[in-house]
Amino acid sequence: MINKQLTQKEHKIDTAALLLTALLTAIAGEFKLIPFNGESFRFGLGSIAFFLLLLIRPTGSLPLTGVVTGLTVVVFRTGVEMTMTSVSFSESFQHHLPILLYYVVFAMGFHIIPFDKYRDSPLMLGAWASLFEFVGNGSESIMRIIMLDRDGLLLKDLALIAGVAILRSFFVVGLYSSIMISEQKKRVREMLGIGSNLYAESLYLQKSMNHIEQVTAASHDLYRKLKQKNLHDLSVQALAIAQEIHEVKKDNQRIVAGLSNITKEKSADFFLLSNLFELVITSNRKYSELLKRTVDFRLTMTVDYETDQHIPLLALLNNVTANAVESIAHKGAVGIHVFEEADDLCITIRDTGKGIRKEDIPILFEPGYTTKFNEQGVAATGIGLSHVQQIVQTLQGEIHIESLEIGTAFQIRIPSHTLVMR
């Protein structure tokens, strides 16, 4: 029963997509090239639009899409011709009817192979599309010869049809691949951002678990002492507290395990350092716009290589750069300088913000330290920079803060061997 329901769902017709494909194809078909004498046969943008729409907006039924689109094109062209000339409906309809065969043949071809199997194989997709377009155009030409008593196609005509089919098909496949690559890059950026945030939060959870372990031990020790002094009610209460804390610890362990699995999966890939820094600048430029602040980002790099530690690096860089953006009141700059020194990757992030008091630097990485308040005057959690310090320590590096005459500089050093892809 479930399989039957799934099958029915997969074949559900998207009426909006079907009508959109038919109408756009008909309109695009009016932009045309006529290679042979007369207007019987033409190469238009209609087939390009049709193939592209089949790729990016599936309708749920290729055969139905071919029939509906073909009929729509025939009726549309008939209406346009009747509006611009004095030809009768029957004559015009008969003149354009053969195009129906092209769209039916093309759609049926991809219905048979089947279509989705080749979406991720551009060469095979282009080859199949070229074949179906050639067969479709050939079928349309034969139908015109039979219905309209036209001259037969010469070898050079077939060669032209084949050449246009190949060029047009691979043009659409290339355009579709470009769109898909762009969308994939966008999704990768989004997933990297999510992964880096989860990584930072998992570190904080791990630190909290250590505190929970200490509290559990202290509660259990209190239980034993109260029991030794025959304070039964209090000892039972202390034991209950210890047990409740232990349950909280187990819940946290399950969460940390889940987050660790996610971040490990993300870390299985690798990225160029330059791509990571571009991502950091892009996301923080958007963040500055959200805060209605004008920030000029400047990046200079004298070293670049692939790393599989992109998740912790993103968490680290986004936290520091976001703090730099937040320190700028209205207009300012954030400069990022990346270089290698003594087998260490060195990153300096400078801002022209309000700066940090020198006396606050020693406590800057303490959980709870913050200078940020929301519109209601409520302080932020103050755990961002403690995340940063934990990440740097995890990567065997070190971080220093320098209070400048204007703004602040974060200086990060990480051994290159911990970052270079293994």
Image: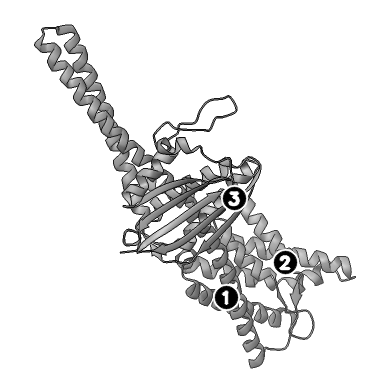
Is 210 on the left or on the right of 110, as rendered? left
Q: Which residue is mark 2?
A: 28
Closest to the observer, 222 or 233: 222
Foreground mark, 2 or 1, reads 1
Q: How many marks?
A: 3
Say few, some or many: other residues with alpha carbon within 10 Å of mark 1 (under 14 / 14 to 19 / 20 or more): some
Asked which secondary structure carries label 2, the reply is helix
Closest to the observer, 210 or 335: 335
The x, y position of residue 14, in whole percent, is 58, 51
Whichever of callouts 2 and 1 sits on the residue coming sooner in the sequence is 2
Is 412 on the left or on the right of 179, as rendered? left
Residue at the image point whose x is 19% and y is 25% from the top: 217
Q: Which residue is mark 1?
A: 170
**418 in relation to 354, above or below:** below
Foreground mark, 3 or 2, reads 3
Residue at the image point whose x is 45% and y is 63% from the top: 339
Can the viewer see residue 11 in this picture? no
Is 250 on the left or on the right of 289, as rendered? left
